Every structure is written in C-alpha cells, then in structure tokens.
Image (cartoon, rainbow, N blue to C red):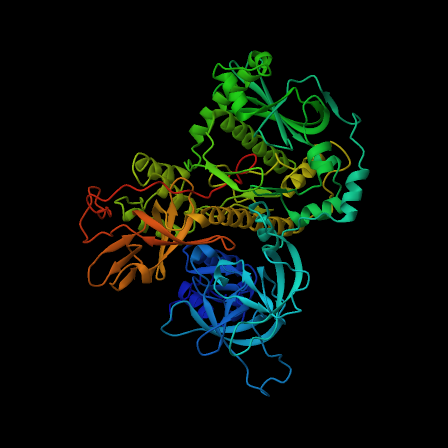
C-alpha cells in the first residue's frame, strides 16, 4: 500500500490516492466523503485536505460522483437502482441502471440473480419491467457486464410501456416506441385493449411473461391517435412524462389575474424599445434599444437597454401558477406544437411584450464604452410599450438597405444605434474569446396537415447575434448585481471539460493529424484554435460536433462555477422568464436585492433550497432536450419511410463493437449500419483509432469517414434508421498529408449519390447556454 500523507505529525495521516481508490473499489456499500473519513479516522480540519484529494482524483477522471456515491470511473456503484428490461437466452433477467450518462456509451447490462424460493421469505420475486435495488459486482472478463442480487423490488410491474396499438382478429399487438425495445412486440389479448383503436398511442401494463411466445399486456390508457405526423410529439410527451395539460387550479388562477398597472413602476412607455424575434414567435420575452451616451466622458459610448417581461408580477411564490411552472421547469418546443411553462393567458397575453400595448417589465440599462467595456448598469421596474415587432430577417434587411414600411421610420432613430452598439459589444466579445462553435442550426418545416415539408438551414444573421449578445450582457449584469447584494440566486454554470473527455477528443483529432497542446490552462481559445485549423477542410462540421460533445453540460446551480463556453466568471439566466423557471427566480432575487417591490425572493429562501430547484429544473431541461431531439428523429424517419432503397451521403459519427452510426448530410438524420452487414470479413473494434478493422482484408471504417449508404429500414415510431454501407473502407494504413490516415474513397467510376436529409431542429429564441 502506498505511503500516506501526514502534513501534521500527531494527527492521523491523510490517505494516499492509491488508498482511496482501493477503498472505493472494494466497497460493498455506498461510499462518500463521510465514509472515507470514517474508514481512515479523519476528523475536524483534516477533512478539508481529504476533500482536496478527492477533488483532484475526480478531476483526473479516476472516480465519478453520482447518487450512488463515489465509484471508479466507468464502473457501477456497489448498490444500483435498475429496471429489468429483458431476458437472455438462458432465461435470466437483464437489467439496466435507471441513471446512466449516455455519453459514456450504451448502459451496462446486469444479469439479475433471482433469489431461490425460501431463501428470503419477505422478498417479492422480481419480474419483467420491475424496478429493483441491486447489489452488483463486475463480471470478470466481460467489460460492461455485471451480476446483481436483488435487495428490494421497488416497483412491481409499474414501468410504463408506451407503444402503438395494432388491432388484430383476436386482440392486438403493441409496437413499443423506444428504440431499444424495437422488435419486442407485446400481445394484447381480446378484451384487454380498452378503448384503443388501430394506430393509437397507448400505455400498457405488462402481465407476467410466459416462457414461450410474446409477453402479454393490458392497455391502461389511450393517449391519442397517431394518424398524422402532427401527433408524433405525443410520443415524446408521454415517454418522458412531460406535463402538458394545466391543472384546473392553475388555469383558474391565470384567468383571475388582473393586468399590472403603473403603481411602483417607472413610466418608460415613450422609450423606443422594440422586439426582434422569429416570424412565428407567439410570446415576446425581451425588447431592446440603444442610444449614444451623451456623457462627454464616454466618447463613442452607448447606453444599451434590455427590457424583460415581468413575469414575477403575475406568478407569485407558492401559487398554483408557480408550483406548476416549477414542475415543468421550461417550455418545450416541437415542430408541431409548444408545451408552455405558463398558461397562454400569462405567456402569450399579459407578459408578452406586444406591439403598442402597455406591459410590465424588469429592465437593465447598461453604459458601455466605444470598445464594448461596460462602465456601469442599473435595474428598473417599468411599464413599457413596444414601438414595433420585427422579425430577424426584417430588421437585417433594413440595415442592409432594404427597409419596408414598418422599418423605414425606425431605421435612423432605432435600428442604426442598435447595430452601432452591437459593433462595440462584438469587439469586447471577440477580445474575451468565448467558444466559437460553427454548427448549422437546422429546422424542420411542416405542411399544414403536419407532414414534413422540408428541412432548412436558416441564415445566421447579425440580427441574431445582436440579440444574443445583448441578452448575454443582461444576464451578466443580473449575476453581478445579485452577487454584490449578497443575494442568493441560481447561476447558469458551465464547467470546463472533464479530463476523460479531453482524452477522447485528443484521440479523434489525432486520427486526422491534429494534436492538442498538453501545456497551458484549459480555455475556450484552445478549442477555437483547433476549430480554426479544420475550418476549411472536409472535417469542419464533424470536428465542431466532436468538440461540442467534449464539453460539459450547462446546468443550474446556487454555487457559481463560471461559464466556460462563454468565458465568463459569473452568469445567470435573466432574459426568458416566460419559458424558463430559472429566470423567474433571478427576477425575484433582483426585485428583492434592488428593492423594486414586495414580490421579490423571500429572505427565507436558502442556498440549499435554490440548489434543489437548480437540480430539478436542470433535469427538466435535459428531459425537454431529449424529447425534442427524439421527436425530430421520428418525424424524419416517418418522412423517409417511403424512400427505403434510396441512397444518401453522410459521415461516420460513431463507431462501436456493434456497428457504425451514420449522420446524413443536409439534415443530419442519424442511422445505424450493423457490423454483420459490412461484408464477409470479420471486423474488430479498434477503440484507439475509433475504427472497425477487417481481420483478413485490413479494410478500415473510421470515425469521420465520408460514406455513401442505402436506406434499408425506417422505423417511424421509434425514429430509427438502418443503413447498408455502400462505400469501400480504407484498404491499408497509409499516411495522409497531415500525418493522419488516408481517408476512404469510392471506387473509380462509381456514380454520384443524391444528398441525404438531416434532422436537427431549431429552437425559438436562441440557445440553451
């Protein structure tokens, strides 16, 4: 055992890194800092040293932190909450952990060791789709496989199966909507279909699985008809348990709200504030304006104003509106519908900054210099009246010399000062050097009946960048004000990339001859240099996506960790309280800190309470992102269902032992090529090279390779595509011009292929930074 560290003779020595790792690896119960301190006799002030050692080990990627405590990186904790999903060939149940980071790859499989009858009389026997608490151990010689002994059956057959009902002569069948359940249909005996009709989306409770034949189930609830693509978002709503029907109490409270008046507010109705939004926006969170600073001490400077809908005036803490907004966490945006955080009476009426109508707002006024440096700022509670409602394209056209009847009178007094102020802020942004990813934002457009019309890449205009930069500066000002007032708040935090993700990124970049510098602090500028190196190459979009995947996920927290991507020391979401609960909390905190009313954040609210809210709304955000992404996948698969046999171009976006993931050009639809279809050779997974390599031929299919594929299957309900690879792989490990491997090429004389379609959707008003 390694020598322990003892900086203070007479006190117990701190355990070494090796001691701690060995203790965690051998633990059979949950392990945290408290358990480690108790095991090594560490007390009092020495716990600070232990905390520092644990943080260093965690930053190195050797251990991971989760609800199951501390574990070795890549390993499950000793005790796991898991769902029993299937059986293996021997009839044993196979479970997967309830919580698993998908970026680590597929979830590990746990073979459930069923207790023998009589061994544990009080323990109920587990069944398919039960949720169980397991004590697990890694299976020797099989990476990612575990055995688990049942400690407790948490839920008996309570796992909800969502699927599409297909009627038959004697009952029917359920086609599950989850990708991992594809091919495992559920039989519905006659009389157990309830009110379900052919093609309906239903929830099903499973009965006991028999040794032979399909599992049997009973329809619990008819969720809606999937007669058109316009209803496909229903799948995501129910699969992810997203609340989408407001309670009667919430609606009644919204209907009873009276419009806010001028009492306690500054009258800004004469200010030339305007809204700039997508053309189809129904709610308007923010309005902006800028004027030259008249102060002779600030030559060339500007006074920039951002006014945000005052949701706190209507949604009071503890009310039905507030409770439901917290439960939803945020609005969810699908191509065919929006699931709002607040009822339309609030979001689209009283709080929406409508043109020529009086509206309450919380505004920040920022004085900036000619080079974009902020000199000071102040917050105000106001009544405003939007001068005009413009779309991004409309505002941009006016600046570019093509004003219309709406923008012509606004051009000189309103729009040109806005763009001049943006030029100053842009200079400061460029000097700050935030992460500069260049990924096209694709949007799925539907026909009036809900079918996919086309997938487009909306132009990225300076009008978009202007609003984004104004919002960022307002968010920073909010965080600064609350910190100075020592007022608890919810930050938007974005940690720097983990060491293990940086290693993975380094491996991918090395495959095209680019090395990550090993010295120097980790800063966005490092990634910007890497992105610049591939900007004009065939790898540009792919490497941008790989760099994005290497980043930590931004979350909400009451402790400030800074925002790595924006390269900011403090950051809070302030600008979208209509659709994000975090912003509503920040508004209430500002009202309290700046003494702008009696409806601010209560002094009883603690940092711990805000941390819990941050965890809850961060989970809601992840839920919304997954639902939005899966809905796009299903829409695209539905759109491609009648194009089976068509050929597309794309790029290998993932390599696993099971096969290749392909991302199609133009629309980014993701599909899979099973390894069994690659050819007569036996292919080996080369993890270091992110490639599948033929044992006999040496033919290689590698991450990032450009390929051509044929669509073999489109499972619309699951959003799954299966391809056949048409491109030849690299036949031998020759060196490319940049020091990397040569790329795969199509055989000489092969015909060109039509471009594919992509499935990334765009979101109303900006990113989720």
Q: Is residue 514 visible?
A: yes
Q: Camera-side residue: 604 or 161? A: 161
Q: Camera-side residue: 701 or 494? A: 701
Where does the N terminus fall, quadrant-wise? bottom left
Q: Position of residue 202 (x, y in %)?
A: 62, 59
Residue 506 sits above or below residue 41 on the image: above
Please identify the quarter of the rendering in which residue 435 is found.
top left
Q: Position of residue 497 (x, y in %)?
A: 43, 48
Residue 638 located left or right of residue 386? left
Residue 47 located left or right of residue 72? right
Residue at (67% x, 36% y) in the render = 587
Residue at (46% x, 40% y) in the render = 565
Residue 87 sits above or below residue 282 on the image: below
Q: Is residue 82 visible?
A: no
Residue at (34% x, 39% y) in the render = 540
Residue 554 sits above or below residue 500 on the image: above
């Amino acid at each position: 055992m390694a020598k322990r560290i003892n900086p203070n003779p007479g006190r117990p020595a701190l355990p070494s890194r090796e001691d701690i790792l060995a203790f965690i690896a051998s633990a059979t119960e949950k392990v945290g800092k408290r358990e480690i301190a108790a095991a090594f006799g560490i007390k009092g002030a020495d716990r600070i040293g232990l905390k520092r050692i644990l943080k260093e080990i965690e930053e190195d990627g050797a251990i991971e932190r989760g609800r199951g405590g501390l574990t070795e990186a890549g390993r499950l904790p000793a005790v796991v909450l898991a769902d029993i999903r299937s059986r293996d060939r021997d009839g044993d149940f196979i479970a997967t952990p309830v919580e698993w980071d998908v970026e680590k790859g597929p979830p590990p499989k746990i073979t459930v060791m069923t207790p023998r009858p009589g061994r544990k009389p009080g323990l109920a026997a587990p069944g398919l789709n039960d949720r169980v608490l397991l004590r697990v151990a890694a299976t020797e010689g099989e990476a990612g496989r575990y055995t688990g002994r049942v400690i407790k059956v948490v839920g008996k057959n309570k796992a909800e199966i969502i699927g599409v009902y297909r009627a038959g002569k004697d009952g029917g069948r359920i086609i599950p909507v989850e990708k991992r359940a594809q091919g495992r249909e559920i039989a519905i005996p006659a009389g157990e279909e309830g009110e379900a009709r052919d093609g309906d989306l239903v929830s099903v409770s499973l009965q006991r699985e028999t040794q032979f034949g399909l599992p049997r189930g009973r329809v619990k609830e008819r969720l809606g008809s999937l007669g058109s693509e316009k209803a496909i978002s229903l799948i995501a709503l129910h699969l992810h348990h997203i609340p989408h029907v407001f309670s009667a109490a919430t609606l009644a409270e919204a209907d009873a709200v009276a419009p806010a008046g001028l009492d306690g507010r500054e009258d800004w109705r004469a200010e030339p504030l305007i809204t700039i939004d997508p053309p189809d926006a129904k709610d308007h969170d923010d309005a902006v304006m800028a004027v030259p600073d008249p102060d002779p001490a600030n030559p060339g400077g500007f006074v920039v104003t951002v006014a945000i809908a005052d949701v706190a005036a209507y949604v009071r803490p503890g009310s039905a509106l507030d409770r439901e907004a917290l439960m939803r966490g945020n609005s969810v945006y699908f191509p065919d519908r929006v699931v709002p955080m607040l009822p339309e009476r609030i979001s689209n009426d009283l709080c929406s900054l409508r043109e020529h109508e009086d509206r309450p707002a919380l505004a920040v006024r920022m004085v900036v210099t000619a080079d974009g440096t902020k000199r000071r700022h102040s917050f105000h509670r106001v009544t405003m009246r939007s001068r005009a409602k413009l779309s991004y394209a409309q505002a941009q056209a006016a600046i570019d010399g093509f004003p219309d009847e709406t923008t012509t009178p606004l051009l000189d007094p309103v729009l040109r000062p806005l763009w001049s102020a943006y030029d100053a802020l842009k200079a400061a942004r460029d000097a700050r050097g935030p992460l500069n990813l260049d990924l096209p934002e694709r949007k799925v457009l539907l026909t009036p009946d809900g079918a996919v019309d086309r997938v487009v890449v909306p132009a990225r205009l300076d009008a978009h960048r202007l609003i984004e930069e104004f919002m960022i500066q307002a968010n920073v000002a909010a965080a600064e004000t609350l910190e100075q007032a020592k007022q608890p708040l919810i930050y938007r935090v974005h940690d720097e990339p983990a060491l293990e993700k940086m290693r993975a990124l380094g491996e991918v970049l090395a495959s095209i001859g680019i090395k990550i510098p090993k010295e120097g602090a980790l800063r966005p500028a490092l990634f910007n240099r890497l992105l610049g190196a591939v900007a004009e190459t065939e790898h540009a979009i792919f490497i941008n996506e790989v760099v994005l995947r290497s980043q930590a996920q931004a979350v909400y927290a009451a402790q400030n960790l800074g925002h790595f991507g924006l390269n900011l020391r403090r950051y809070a979401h302030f600008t979208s309280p209509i659709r994000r609960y975090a912003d509503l909390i920040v508004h209430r905190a500002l009202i309290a800190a700046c003494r702008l009313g009696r409806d601010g954040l209560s002094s009883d609210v603690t940092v711990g309470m805000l941390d819990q809210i941050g965890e809850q709304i961060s989970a809601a955000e992840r839920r919304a992102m997954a639902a939005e992404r899966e809905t796009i996948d299903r829409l695209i698969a539905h759109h491609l269902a009648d194009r089976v046999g068509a050929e597309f171009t794309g790029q290998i976006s993932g390599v696993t032992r099971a096969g290749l993931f392909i991302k199609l050009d133009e629309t980014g639809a993701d599909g899979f090529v099973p390894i069994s279809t690659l050819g007569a050779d036996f292919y080996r997974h080369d993890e270091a090279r992110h490639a599948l390599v033929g044992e006999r031929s040496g033919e290689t299919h590698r991450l990032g390779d450009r390929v051509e594929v044929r669509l073999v299957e489109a499972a619309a309900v699951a959003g799954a595509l299966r391809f056949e690879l048409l491109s030849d792989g690299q036949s031998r490990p020759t060196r490319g011009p940049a020091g990397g491997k040569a790329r795969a090429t199509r055989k000489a004389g092969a015909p060109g292929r039509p471009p594919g379609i992509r499935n990334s959707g765009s979101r109303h008003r900006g990113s989720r930074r």
